[in-house]
Structure formats: structure tokens, C-alpha cells
Image: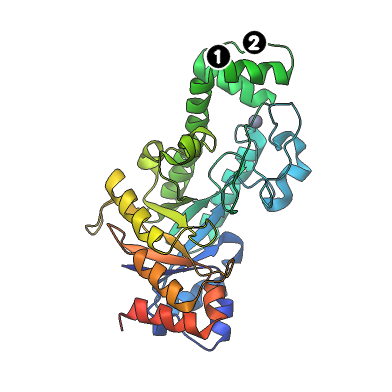
């Protein structure tokens, strides 16, 4: 069982605690926070170390601001605004893709890690806020060209608004399938790089915790996220089941974990993949009581799940009640 934490452990360490005293055996840390001191200390406290890798986050590294050609283009032909705090990137822009893949190679070359967790592996959208935002992108030249090549269709119209309208009216399904293929191909190359440089390392995916049919299938249709398509390239699926943020009850965590366990070929035997390690909410937005946090942590281990972690370890460290709840669940007492 993976008893994980998400976020740099510094705030936890500031309380004077050790990770192994709390039963933590895996830390998931943003790739930028993985310096040798952090890695060595987490290892000395008995932990596996996994890097969160900001995949299609256009703001990470200020990329789209310095390279506006990678800013996603909306159906009206204009660069899309941020979806509250998130801005995606054009996933077919060759410069952006090369930049991100090189960042992954650089990370794997220096950091002694046990795996890489893809984050923001989806088209520009906002699903982490209580009121999600969906935007249809991307209609820049490289995306339109890629869609035509992939589908064999000739998109009609002169302007981007005309072309996007033609797609929605005449080729919505192939367009959605093409968008899935673009995301799957990112996962394919990321896996190839990870296995080339660190063959033992796992490839995980942080993903929206929506069922296939939720909101009219918008997870696949708008975000381009098809878990069957990702199956060959993902060792561990980590749905972000933030019940409080999304207006659900704590029990929904259990329901979703069981749903995912039934709908996808999740493995539980040692050495068998893919596995299911959800991430649950500790963060007080809205307020999550220690009792509630302890429950969702336990629910995260329901079904065929063989691991769990929380967003974030800092939120746990800030609340002695949550520290006690984590210790109780992870040490089983
Ligand atoms: Zn594009």
C-alpha cells in the first residue's frame, strides 16, 4: 500500500515530525522542488519519491508568454483567456512539445526518482474549481493542420471562426477523437522518455475525477481525456477526488474509487499494472475537518486502490487534528 503525500514536505518537517513516524512511505513533489537535500531526507525516512510534472500547463516556465505561438486559440480566432487560474498550451506546437520533453529529460537525468506523475494532461479547461469552465481549443495553424492530416478531412472556410464552425457542424466527433489522440500521444512520448532514462520508474497521471458519462461526457469531449486510450502508457492513475471543492460528500470518494476499479482493468497483485492511487482533499477550501479528512483518506483506499495521497501535505501539517488522522489511517491505529 502506498501511503503518500502530495507537496514538498518542508512544512511537515517544520513540525519536527519524520515521515516514517506517520506511516508515510511515498512523497509526491512538484518537479521543481526536488533538490538532492529533499530527496535524501525523504529517502532516509523510508519514502519513495515521485515527481509531479506540469505537462500542458502553459504558464509553467512562463512558456506561452514568452512564446505566444503556443497560446491556445479559441473558436473565434483569438488567444483564449485563462480559465480562472489555469492556462493551457497548444499541444501540437512543436516548440512547446520539444521544450517540455527536454525538461522531462533534464529532470530524469539529475533527480533520483521512482516515477513521474503527469499533471495537466488535457486541453485548456478548468475542472478543479467548483464551477468548471470548458473551452473549445485549439484552432491555430498547427492544430488545424494536424486535425486535417489525422482525419483526412479538408476543413472548409477562410477565417478561424468559419473553420471552427464548420468543424462543430460537420466533424465534431472526428475532432474530439483527434484531440484524444493528441493527448494520448503526449503520454506515449513521456512514457518512452521515462522508461528510456529510468526503466524502473513509474508513469502516473493526475486526472479529473469524472465518470465517463458525467456532464454529457465532457471529460473526453472537451478535455480530450480518454482513460482507455491512456491505458497503455500509464502505470498508475491518480484521480483528483476533491470532494469539498466539487460539492460532493466524503462518501463520493469511495463511490468514485469503486467506479474506477470496476470500469478500468486496475491491478492489485505485486508488480502488476495499471494501479489506482487517488489523491483526496485535505486543503481547507472549503473547510475539511480532521474527521472528514481521515474518512476521505480511508475511502481513497477502497475498491482496487493500492495507494492514496492528499492535497496537500502542508494542509495536514497546519492542523494537528489532520496530522493525527493521517497517522491513524497510515499506521492503522
Ligand atoms: Zn494549437
Contact flag, marks 2 and 1 (Cβ < 8 Å): yes
Residue 36 locus on image (x, y percent) = 55, 71
**Camera-side residue of 56 and 243:** 243
Residue 104 locus on image (x, y percent) = 55, 50
Quadrant of the rendered image containing residue 125:
top right
Residue that badge 2 annotates: 156
Q: Can residue 113 be seen in this view?
A: no
Left or right of 147 on screen, residue 79: right
**Against 97, is 208 above or below?**
below
Task: Mark 2 or mark 1: name the one nearer the start of the chain.
Answer: 2
Q: Is mark 2 on a helix, strand or loop?
A: loop
**Against 49, is 40 above or below?**
below
**Camera-side residue of 214 and 232:** 214
Quadrant that contains the N terminus: bottom left
Q: Disc 2 and disc 1: Cα gap in Å?
A: 10 Å
**Against 138, is 189 above or below?**
below
Report the number of numbered marks.
Answer: 2
Q: What element carries label 1?
A: helix
Q: Residues within 10 Å of mark 2 (few under 14, many from 20)?
A: some
Residue that badge 1 annotates: 170
Residue at the far bottom in the pictured view: 16
Q: Is residue 36 visible?
A: yes
**Against 52, is 186 above or below?**
above
Whereabouts is ligand 1, in terms of quadrant? top right
Left or right of 4 on screen, residue 267: left
Quadrant of the rendered image containing residue 10:
bottom right
Residue 113 locus on image (x, y percent) = 46, 62
Q: Residue at x 50, y 78 (%)?
A: 41
Amino acid at each position: 500500500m502506498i501511503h503518500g503525500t502530495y507537496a514538498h514536505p518542508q512544512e511537515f518537517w517544520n513540525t519536527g515530525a519524520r515521515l516514517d513516524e506517520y506511516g508515510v512511505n511515498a512523497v509526491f513533489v512538484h518537479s521543481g522542488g526536488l533538490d538532492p537535500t529533499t530527496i535524501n531526507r525523504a529517502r532516509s525516512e523510508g519514502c519513495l519519491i515521485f515527481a509531479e510534472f506540469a505537462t500542458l500547463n502553459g504558464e509553467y516556465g512562463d512558456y506561452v508568454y514568452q512564446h505566444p505561438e503556443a497560446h491556445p486559440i479559441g473558436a473565434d480566432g483569438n488567444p483564449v483567456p485563462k480559465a480562472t487560474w489555469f492556462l493551457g498550451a497548444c499541444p501540437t506546437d512543436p516548440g512547446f512539445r520539444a521544450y517540455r520533453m527536454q525538461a522531462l529529460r533534464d529532470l530524469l537525468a539529475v533527480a533520483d526518482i521512482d516515477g513521474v506523475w503527469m499533471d495537466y494532461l488535457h486541453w485548456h479547461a478548468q475542472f478543479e474549481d467548483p464551477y468548471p469552465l470548458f473551452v473549445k481549443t485549439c484552432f491555430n495553424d498547427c492544430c488545424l493542420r494536424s486535425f486535417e492530416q489525422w482525419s483526412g478531412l479538408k476543413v472548409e472556410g477562410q477565417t478561424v471562426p468559419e473553420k471552427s464552425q464548420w468543424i462543430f457542424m460537420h466533424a465534431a466527433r472526428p475532432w474530439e477523437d483527434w484531440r484524444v489522440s493528441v493527448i494520448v500521444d503526449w503520454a506515449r512520448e513521456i512514457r518512452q522518455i521515462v522508461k528510456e532514462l529510468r526503466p524502473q520508474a513509474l508513469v502516473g497521471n493526475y486526472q479529473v475525477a469524472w465518470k465517463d458519462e458525467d456532464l454529457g461526457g465532457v471529460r473526453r469531449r472537451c478535455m480530450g481525456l480518454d482513460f482507455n486510450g491512456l491505458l497503455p502508457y500509464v502505470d498508475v492513475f491518480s484521480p483528483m477526488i476533491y470532494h469539498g471543492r466539487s460539492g460532493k460528500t466524503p462518501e463520493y470518494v469511495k463511490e468514485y474509487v469503486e467506479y474506477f476499479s470496476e470500469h478500468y482493468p486496475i491491478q492489485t497483485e505485486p508488480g502488476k499494472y495499471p494501479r489506482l492511487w487517488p489523491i483526496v482533499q485535505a486543503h481547507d477550501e472549503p473547510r475539511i475537518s480532521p474527521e472528514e479528512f481521515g474518512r476521505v483518506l480511508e475511502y481513497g483506499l477502497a475498491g482496487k486502490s493500492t495507494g492514496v495521497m492528499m492535497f496537500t501535505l502542508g494542509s495536514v501539517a497546519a492542523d494537528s487534528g489532520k496530522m493525527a488522522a493521517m497517522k491513524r489511517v497510515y499506521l492503522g491505529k
